[in-house]
Image: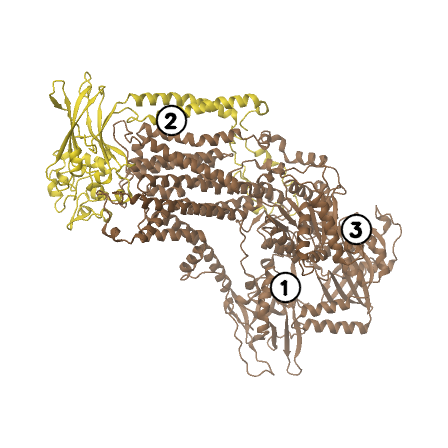
Chain colours: A yellow, B brown
Amino acid sequence: MMASSYSAKEEDGHHPGASGAGGAAANGRKPDNTAFKQQRLPAWQPILTAGTVLPAFFAIGLIFIPIGIGLYVTSNNIKEFEIDYTGTDTSSPCFSCYQNFSWNSTLPCKCSLPFSLDQPFESNVFMYYGLSNFYQNHRRYVKSRDDSHLNGNLYSLTHPSKECEPYAHRDNVPVAPCGAIANSMFNDTMELFFVHPNETRSQIPLKRKGIAWWTDKHVKFRNPGGNGDNLTAAFQGTTYPVNWHKPVYELDADPENNGFINEDFIVWMRTAALPTFRKLYRIIEKKSSMTPTLPSGNYTLEVTYNYPVHSFDGRKRMILSTISWMGGKNPFLGIAYITVGSVCFFLGVVLLLIHHKYGNRSSSPDIAS
Amino acid sequence: MLRRRLNHLFGGDEKRVDSRTIYVGHRQCPGTEAFIAPKFCDNRIVSSKYTVWNFLPKNLFEQFRRIANFYFLIIFLVQVIVDTPTSPVTSGLPLFFVITVTAIKQGYEDWLRHKADKEVNKYLVTVLEDGRRIRKESERIKVGDVVEVVEDETFPCDLILLQSSRDDDTCFVTTASLDGESNHKTHYTVPDTEKDLESLTATIECEQPQPDLYKFVGRMHIYRSDQDPAVRSLGPENLLLKGATLKNTKKIYGVAVYTGMETKMALNYQGKSQKRSAVEKSINAFLLVYLCILLSKALVCTTLKYVWQSRDGQDEPWYNQKTQKEKDAYKFLKMFTDFLSFMVLFNFIIPVSMYVTVEMQKFLGSFFITWDKDFFDPEIQEGALVNTSDLNEELGQVEYVFTDKTGTLTQNNMEFIECCIDGFQYKNRDSCSELDSFCVTDGPVSKLHEKAGREKEELFLRALCLCHTVQVKEAGDMETVSEDQIDGLLPPTEQQKGFIASSPDEVALVMGAMKYGFTFLGLDSKTMKIRNRQNDVELYELLHVLNFDPVRRRMSVIVRSKAGETLLFCKGADSSIFPRVRSEEVDRIRVHVERNATEGYRTLCVAYKQLCTEEYVEVDAKLREARLALQDREEKLMAVYNQVETGMSLIGATAVEDRLQEEAAETMEALQEAGIKVWVLTGDKMETAKSTCYACRLFQRGTELLELTVRTLEDGGRKREERLHELLLEYHKKAVQDAPPAKLGVRRSWVTASQEYGFIIDGATLSLVLNSSPEASSTRYKSLFLQICQNCTAVLCCRMAPLQKAQIVKMVKNSKGSPITLSIGDGANDVSMILEAHVGIGIKGKEGRQAVRNSDYAIPKLKHLKKLLLAHGHLYYVRIAHLVQYFFYKNLCFILPQFLYQFFCGYSQQPLYDAAYLTMYNICFTSMPILAYSLLEQHIAIESLMDTASLYREVAKNATLRWGPFLYWTTLGIFHGLLFFFGVRCLFSNPALQDNGQVFGNWSYGTIVFTVLVFTVTLKLALDTRHWTWINHLVIWGSLAFYVFFSFFWGGIIWPFLQQQRLYFVFANMLSSVSAWLVIILLILLSLLPEILVLVLRKPRGPHRRQKNPGQSSVGGQQSTQASARPLLMRTFSDESNTVR
């Protein structure tokens, strides 16, 4: 495949009769006879022709179609259940909460939604909340945070960046955590109950750890003054965001999951790419290999409805999903792979026909030496 | 051209203040009143542009005058002032980089200039002051100082030579650093000045400084206590120019007349006008398109933003309140700043780095021309020279080549072939014949067995020996003889002698005379010594030299023989001699002259006249008077010359052969095959030029020649204008209307059925065509003429004045379709056309270095033009065209996803990519592969390009930078951009992409798109690369590796200087997701699929085939096959020269 070096050619031809006076004396100005300077670097000169590309097309087809089928099957095997609990519909149990939302109400509005799973969820189940028409990727919103503040920097804690405006100060007291993202943190709480056939309910344990990126939890987000015990003291001199109901150091009882390193908070702080998104809320771990994590049957979702979406026509969803090696349910990849694989295969066949029919003239080797 | 313009410019000056008066040695002269020291500028040379304190503002101002830089500055300022999505750093950093690099480069160059200035200005010179010799710094020389210069020193300012250490009151200088002419020139002291400079009291009156190196007019008044002031004329022969070097002379004294910036050297220090290449025009056109795209994108986004915001709850939802300042902002101002923000967000579509890369490509690429050893000429020990790198790609676009004949097509290495005395032909083929072998019977080929009378013979040979300005190089300093003079040709007995002359014809003639027994021994204080055939030395007093000039086309000398006869010998072109001699003599010689001219020789006629004493006295007086004239000296001299050179009798004619350049015919043939039209523009006469054209195979046997010369015009015996009109129409009918429309790309074959036409026009007719009557007919003539010429395979324009050459070039340049023109020449008379054409090429010939200095590229030989155009030009064009298209493409598919993202983020100008990626994309991730490609790509091997000249047609007419290919690339960019964005968009319909159920955010989205983008764009280039050297491998795989490495690094650390750690571990997390991998691979493949298909389905090209068997293309074998395959034409010099070589 490598072009032969041109050394043979460099010898001949240039100055056979140049034996004139001083020919040897002033050779200093003669250009160097190096391969680079003479543009004669040995080079590989690939030429794509039907002959080389045909096998590649078939290979791509043969590789992609199985991958695609694999992906498609995997995606189809993922169990996913989605329920909209916004309450826009009058028949919805959350309708009153949706309608009568007020920032000032001290009593949380609660609603419970019954649903049933037709098929059991075998492996670990991941519980997501989904929001629609919520522009977490709006520029004003995305930049409204202070990462050094969130990293536990004591100076930033009391001097939030001006990017956080108008959520940097409340009555001249610095807000922690500052910014629009933190301020609008999703604060609906959801609880899941299995309704036994005998109408008794048992709460399904939801794991609240392991939902955020490991690096975010352990490096990027840090409580001021280290992850010490006395968070209340660490956040002295700051106040909580205007739309919150409680300070940041009361997010969770577990000190490993409180303050800035609260995983719900960290998950929320990773802004979504699109206005319709889902975020991981809880994990339902498989307890034993014998019973499914979520057996088929009736369930109730208890929602503490704190988060208003009415004003911007938003929607709220709860999603239960199992996860495969490729992530959540998404048939796109599988279909795309199958399509591309088939197209390649088809092209391969077409090219083969063309090549076979008119190939005689280009029957020579396809790669120039 | 330039000089002419400058003359014009300074001519005005001259009229305002006529002349300056200089007091030699600052001594007051009797007769003048109070001595007022005139104020002249000091002798400091300032060639630097900047000083320490004005460097920054001045340089910045110069740089921001470039439209592109200014645009980026505006974008940067917008980013600083307005709240924009990307930080000012993203566009400020590249701009800063570009500006800094340019400033450093210019600063360094200026520092070098400062250093050179200082070296010149601080140089110690010896000045005579009040009888003492004082050493002082060169910059402190004042006008009027008497300066001493010793051998091999350069003159510190323009001096009038007062005294020389040589006996004959001359000195020798070389002006190599001024005009590149390396021969020694003789300068003369002012006649009859006192030997004692102490007692010399004189004033010099001379014109104000002007840049023409060869013009000087002055007058010296010498005051002696006992006499009236004597007046001496001063000419350029008395003026020693700053920058020239004293040679062969121990020391001289001179008085400074022009100093510092008023010296001719400084006045000549002018930058050349900048030429812009066609590619740059294409870039600008594309830029405009992209600017429109940019503006419309910003406009669409702004409009949609306000439409979207007008819906309830979208502008300011509770979770995303505006700051008080934003709320207060005036609505229309807000709209405007939104528009600007979008502009800034999308401004990467016009990348600052493209300009840097293009500049770098051009600069570095031009090295390949200088490095090319095929351009190295062992004779002059020099290779090609690149004066400007801006026009590399233009070499691949040439449609018209205008070539000079003498020195370009021919070697300008004259050899005396034969002479004709009194109508009898003398031919001496054997160059090493004995001294006494001068008789016709010895000549092996002569058919005429008679010869002219002995007196005539001797008179003719004496004329040859006397009528010239040749100098004899003294024995002893042979080492300084420039090699390209006539060393090798000397007969063994005269080995120690060399001749130096400004024109090789003269040397050839003197050598010719020597062969026939008359040897010129030298000029010794106005006495010319000749050794005649009897080995006696004859002495002639040289009275006057009537110099050669191209307008008169002749030169004369007036000498007085020992016997007291005053003789005028004149030699010159036949057209300028014939009207001045008796017509009956003419007839006998004309036959020979014309026959010689058809054979391609240069002919000169020799005439003489005897001046009686009265006549001479009158002539002498007139000449002296004219020489003393301070104004219009040239015109006056010319008038006297014309007056003197009349009534002569013709004694003979000479024929000097100017051999064709090596491979001239092959080169011309290749150029024609490449679809380039070759026009020969020469000052020579038609017959000579025509035969050269035949020899170069510009005209073929079957070519029908359309002549439009003075001769054809006068044929009909009618008015010239009418005849011209008639002929033009006739030719037009023949060549344009009746000719079958030439199909584009049809290869010219040797057995073509269609008639080929050659066109010949001469200078007089051309001026008739170009500036005939003031009516509309002149433009009509012009267009007719142009149409005829464009349909001819070759055009010959003879008897051209330099300015006419430029006129023709200009006419073609401005004709329909504005074809790219190239001028090639070697002499000062070609400078105007070299400057006029799009690309000017100088041949490092023997007529000095003026052409080289004014050219864009200089090559040692004509034959190098073939490789320069067919190989280098073609490759450079393809490279830069690809570079430009690729740059626009890669930025389109870079920015398109960003634009599409606006539809999903509420038109909030949220960037899709991180700022680091935005900045680095063009600087680091994708710049090196394209730079390497644009330097190294050889889509067709150089050998194939050289072998198959018709490949040049593939890129003709800006083929790969026209709208078609541009549209293709743009479509490709749009396709890729759409694919990247929506592919990832589909993936993100469920952002839970990791196997632990965690979700990806917006920065992951951007990073996936960006990764696909970088890989696709780089691999697209890899697909286009036909020539993979290790450098290509290194930069292509290297930049991909660098991207991955950088992304890890950038995301791996909490950067303290960053406000937001947006990319913290985003890349690593992306790589931990199988889905992300799969989508990246899928999208890259899908993007490249159409490209691969196009590549496969495009029909395989011939040249690729050929390079498979490199053994076939050995240089020697090919030439022989070519030579034998072609019909042997008349008398081809080139075949001869091939064998001699």
Give the residue at mark 3: B596
Q: Which of the marked residues, 3 or 1, is nearer the chain's N terminus?
A: 1
Q: Subunit of mark 1?
A: B
Number of residues whose C-alpha sits closer than 10 Å to that of mark 2, classed few (under 14), some (14–19) or many (20 or more)? many
Q: Position of residue B965 (x, y in %)?
A: 51, 39
Residue B854 in percent (x, y) is at 59, 55
SS for callout 3: helix
The disc labelled 1 sits on which kind of residue? Tyr
Secondary structure category for the residue under label 1? loop
Disc 3 crowd, CA 10 A, few/some/many (<14, 14-19, 20+): many
Residues indicated by labels 3 and 1 sit on the same polypeptide chain: yes
Q: CA distance from mark 3 to mark 1?
A: 33 Å
Residue name at image x 61 percent, y 74 percent: B205
Name the side, left or right, on which B920 lies relative to B671. Answer: left
Name the residue that disc number 2 marks: A336
Which residue is identified by label 1?
Answer: B214
**Residue B244, labelled with which disc?**
none
Picture quarter containing residue B203?
bottom right
Label 2 lies in what chain? Answer: A
Query: Residue B1119's spot in the image, x, y percent?
Result: 67, 36
In the displayed structure image, the side of residue B89 where residue B766 appears, left or right: right
From the image, state whether disc 2 or disc 3 is nearer to you.
2
Which quarter of the rendered picture does the C terminus of chain B lie within?
A: top right
Q: Amino acid at mark 3?
A: Asn
> Closer to the camera: disc 3 or disc 1?
3
- Residue that extends furthest to the front in the rendered view of this protein: A90
The residues bearing labels 1 and 2 have C-alpha atoms spaced at a distance of 79 Å
Q: Which amino acid, by three-letter code, is at mark 2?
A: Ala
Q: Is residue B404 visible?
A: no
Quarter placement of the N terminus of chain B:
bottom right
Relative image position of residue B864 (x, y in whole percent): 62, 44
